[in-house]
Image: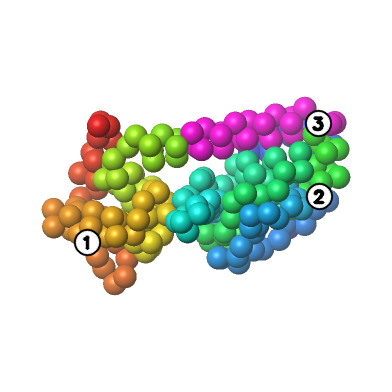
Amino acid sequence: MAGWADQAGFLAGIDVEARQALEALTPMHVPHRTTLFRPGDAAQSFVILLSGRIGVYLTGRNGRELLLYSVTPGETCVQTTLGVLGGAPYSGEAVAESDLVAVMVPPAVFERLMADSMAFRHFVFRAFADRLSDLMFVLEQVAFVKVEQRLAHALIERADEEGHVALTHQELAVIIGTAREVVSRRLEALVSKGVVENERGEIRIVDRPELARMARADQG
């Protein structure tokens, strides 16, 4: 996959020397549902995601999971950045939510790029700031936003062009930070209102405008 950095639009501003150092690394394929790291693991590399989606989860003492943030191409993982920069172990778990293509940047290469390339530093810290914003959004949602609104937002965000959402009730519960039973009850209510349908083990959005209205509803 020669010249992969040229295909990654988010690296457009990287200087020639940094681009050459990155393109010396070979992209790798990671299968769907692969666990990329677990709590307590040490960061082995800085990940540049070229395609696919990674979910980073936190598990509470009661065993309940919460989706902290997702990583898509052009974005970075907060925990990986902290691990490579400062040696902090992972506190969450990362799972490939689809097949991935990613470049694993070894710590030595990452440190050299951070020291020598202003453009690469800008990419890393801009993406890091974006992920912190995502974390603050999750905290705000769980603390202050009603379950119905969080569920509506999650359904719209994860639906394909035809309105299908290929997630289980448990997976939705993890994404919005609640219990599976709560999600099941809220989905039943949406079905009774004609907003969604349960279709062959997945959810199909029937009334997208109404679901979008619910996602935008005022808090409180």
Residue on which disc 3 sits: 117
SS assignment at label 3: loop
Q: Quadrant of residue 110?
A: top right
Report the front residue among 146 and 76.
Answer: 146
Q: Are marks 3 and 2 in contact (CB under 8 Å)?
A: no
User: How far is mark 3 from mark 2, CA to CA?
Assistant: 16 Å
Which label's residue is closer to the chain start, 1 or 3? 3
Q: Give 1 or 197, whichever is nearer the viewer.
A: 197
Protein image colouring: rainbow
Q: Amino acid type of disc 3?
A: Ser
Precedes in sequence: disc 3 or disc 2: 2
Secondary structure predominantly adopted by residues drawn in magenta: helix
Residue 18 at what x, y percent from top left?
81, 38
Label number found at residue 197: 1
Q: Nearer the viewer, mark 1 or mark 3?
A: 1
Marker disc for residue 106: 2
Range covered by the magenta-colored residues: 115-136
Amino acid type indicated by mark 1: Glu
**Spatial separation of the CA atoms under disc 1 and disc 3:** 51 Å
Q: Is residue 204 visible?
A: no
> Can you give x and y, in whole percent of width and height, for residue 185 in the image?
23, 57
Q: Amino acid at mark 2?
A: Pro
Residue extending farthest to the front is 61
